[in-house]
Structure formats: structure tokens, C-alpha cells
Amino acid sequence: MSFDTISVIGLGYVGLPTAAAFASRRKRVIGVDTNQHAVDTINRGAIHIIEPDLGRVVTDAVRQGLLRAVSQPQPADAFLIAVPTPFQHDHEPDLSYVKAAVLSLAPVLEPGCLVILESTSPVGTIEQMAGWLAVARPDLTFPHQAGEAADINIAYCPERVLPSKIMVELIKNDRVIGGMTPCCSARAAELYRIFLEGECVVTNARTAEMCKLTENSFRDVNIAFANELSVICAEQQINVWELIALANRHPRVNILQPGPGVGGHCIAVDPWFIVAQNPAQARLIRTARQINDDKPDWVVEKVKAAVADCLNDSGRGSSDVIIACFGLAFKPDIDDLRESPALYVTELITRWHRGQTLVVEPNVDVLPTSLDGLVTLADRDHALATADVLVMLVDHHQFRALAPSAIRQRWIVDTRGVWR
Ligand SMILES: NC(=O)c1ccc[n+]([C@@H]2O[C@H](COP(=O)([O-])OP(=O)(O)OC[C@H]3O[C@@H](n4cnc5c(N)ncnc54)[C@H](O)[C@@H]3O)[C@@H](O)[C@H]2O)c1
């Protein structure tokens, strides 16, 4: 069966660019999302997230009638699922969104359909997914029952795009294809080749699932090393950024940069999926997670020390001290606040600081509810003019561009090494 109509379920940071990429190759795309605001916005030819170049492609696709958004799945030749996979309070993976998406598309499946899961998932999710579908559609056969002869093909194909570069990386990056059978892999590769310029690298579903988790755990462990170094260097009065730059001159050393922690819903989440399934074996991966999760508390201690110094020096009362936090997003130049250590540091500051807290976040217009009434959203120059203590949390380009002469404050906690 050829892929005339392609459905993407979940129109967020992964799903909407994917839907737009297929539509830009003149495929008919039905996007599905349970969020009515997302559906309405996309059908107006606009986008509900910030991602460079995405708006233009979506506008063109909607205008040409190639992309439309709906809230319930409709028949299609291929379904790609890109819904959230967060963890629960005990760090166990929460597959409820995947299950809901799978069950919502089950009624419209027809023999010959291809179903792909793109959401980052624990090993074995594809097998679970096939099981859910088999229960929902006993009239059809699935790869775990009928192998190559199955009515429905299923594959796991993880996404590894970088927010803010999604429209480029989606097309250029190599794609890992983990079909439940070789036929499933072949069909999935055929689908991605509609827009993919990178290579389709075929493996089995379990390896593909583990591959995505491995990539993010690798990043997490390496960032934990940099974060641990930053804490050690503070004790030893060594500039960690200078140290790392020097060490990286070794031809086989490449240390990452420390920061206020690790955020986002990928690197801060996915390693837990490995830990949850392999609690006895995943010792380094768990420790790295804990080191990165502890970093915001360490940053807040530094802020407390800076405020104490400021009070000593100025003789003012603690409620007169103004703190300005620069950045809330989980990484530079995006609006995504999910699992953001910068947001968490700011929340912690508001719990003890008695004076005013300003927040400078050029990528959001509305503060998250956790900061409602506790901080003031300020512009960069106002914060620089009025704050006593600066806390650099996210190195957005607007902050990196500041000339050293623009910063007159003596009390600075710079978690990104841009104002050193
Ligand atoms: N954002 C990234 O950079 C990135 C990169 C690689 C992998 N991933 C993974 O991709 C998956 C999706 O991430 P995202 O960033 O696009 O999430 P997102 O929250 O931006 O988007 C998910 C969308 O799915 C919708 N949704 C939830 N349940 C649904 C359902 N039952 N039916 C239809 N729509 C539903 C939500 O309303 C939302 O719009 C996650 O597993 C994530 O870990 C994300």
C-alpha cells in the first residue's frame, strides 16, 4: 500500500514538524491532537509552539489543503504517534498517553496500515502497543501474531531532533528504524524516505527503543560529570569554564558545559526509563540523574550566599534586595519550560527570598502558574538597571550579547559561565 494519506497523532514539538515535513512533500496529512487550541490554531495556518521555520511550512501546507488538524483519528495509510511519555512521581514511565493514542486510532485501522511510535519509550513498549491493538481489533492480525504476514505493520522510530533546529534536523538526521519484522522496517523506511535526507538505519524494535534511551543517558551522564566538576571547582576556587577549556585541549577529552541542572522532557526523563527497568544494573545512570537533579539546590545556596553578602555590604534589609533571574526555559533560545532547572531554581528562590524577584525570559509572555504573583516578568534592561543580585540561568542569545560594561552588579551567580 502506498502512503497517500499520513496521520500524525500528537501535534507538539515532534509531531507538528513531522506532519509539516510530509505535507511539504505534497502528501495529504491529517494531524490529530486532543488539545482543541492546537487543532484550531493549526487549521488557521498558525502554530501554537515556538520553532524556527515551522510556521511558514505549516501556513503553506494548510493553505494548499495538504495539512489539516482534527481531534479524533480518521482513516490513513500510516499513523505516527508522537504523544508525551513523562514519568510518574516514582520515576516509572507513564505510558497512558501512548495507550490512549493507540486505542483512539484502533477503530480506523485497515489491513495494510503502518503504525509507528516516535515517542521516547521504555524497551518493550512496541510489543505492548501491538498487544493493545490486537485486543481492540481482533479482526486484524499484528506482527507478534502473524509475523511478516500481519495485516498491520508496526515499528518504533525514535526522534532525535534538537529544539530550535527541528526543521533541519528532522530531515538531515539519520533515522533509526526498529520494525517488529523486517517487512515493518522496510515499510517504515519507505515512509520516512518521503522527506528524509539522512540515512534510515534498520534494527529491531527493542534495540531502537534502547537506542533512544541510550543517547539521552549518554548526554545526561556527561553533563553530570561537568556539573560535578563545577561543584568541586567552586570548593577549590577554580574557574570551571577555564578548567574545561584547558582540559578540552587534550585531543581525546571533550567535557560538556555545566549549568543549573538538566531539563527538558528528554534528557531529564529518559534515563529514568532505563533505571526503572534495570534498578540493579543502572548504577551510573541513576547517579548521574541524581547529580543533575541536585544542582538547582546547589545554585540556590549560591544565590543565598550572594544575597547575604549584598546585605552585609549594603546594610539594607533583606526585603529591599532585588534578585533578577535570567532565563526560565530548559535551554537557550526556546520557550519550553518543561522540567526546566531554571524554572525550578526561580521557584526555590521565591520560597525564601523576602524581596522582589524579577524574571527575564524573552521567549514567554505569560509566567507559569507556579510563579504567579511571586515574581515580576521584566525586560532585560530594566532588570539590569534595578536588580542587586543577578542569577544567570539560561544563556539566551539576548543575554550572551550583553557587553561586560552593561553589568554593574557585584553579586552574580552565573550558572552558564557567560558573565564570568
Ligand atoms: N521535543 C523534543 O525535542 C523531542 C525530541 C525527541 C523525542 N521526543 C519525544 O517525542 C514525544 C513527544 O514529545 P513532544 O515534545 O512533541 O511533546 P508535546 O507535549 O510538545 O506534544 C505532544 C502532543 O500530543 C498531544 N496528545 C496527548 N495525548 C494525545 C492523544 N491521546 N491523542 C492525540 N494527541 C495527544 C498533546 O496535546 C500535545 O500537543 C515524547 O515522547 C518526547 O519524549 C521529543
Image (cartoon, rainbow, N blue to C red):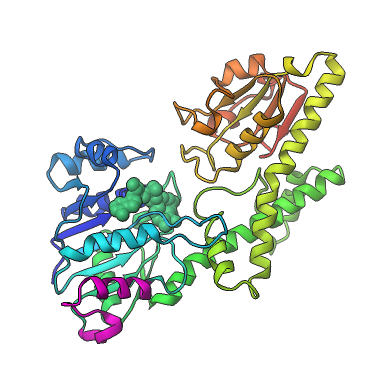
Residue drawn at x 65%, y 64% as measured from the top left: 286
Position of residue 333 relative to residue 339, above or below, is above
In the depicted view, which residue is nearer to us: 314 or 356? 356
Q: Quadrant of residue 140?
A: bottom left
Q: Is residue 116 visible?
A: yes
Residue drawn at x 39%, y 59% as measured from the top left: 96
Position of residue 335 relative to residue 165, above or below, is above
Task: State the quadrant of the C terminus.
Answer: top right
Provide residue 28's location: percent of width, then percent of height: 14, 54
Residue drawn at x 74%, y 43% as measured from the top left: 298
Provide residue 364's location: percent of width, then percent of height: 46, 30
Position of residue 111 relative to residue 371, above or below, is below
Residue drawn at x 72%, y 19% as measured from the top left: 388
Q: Is residue 161 visible?
A: no
Position of residue 48 relative to residue 10, above or below, is above
Provide residue 401's location: percent of width, then percent of height: 58, 28
Per the picture, the main secondary structure of the magenta-coloured stretch is helix
Is residue 131 shown in magenta?
yes
Provide residue 365's location: percent of width, then percent of height: 44, 26
In the depicted view, which residue is nearer to us: 224 or 245? 224
203 sits to left or right of 93: left
Q: Quadrant of residue 380?
A: top right
Find the magenta span and give its range: 126-149
47 sits to left or right of 385: left
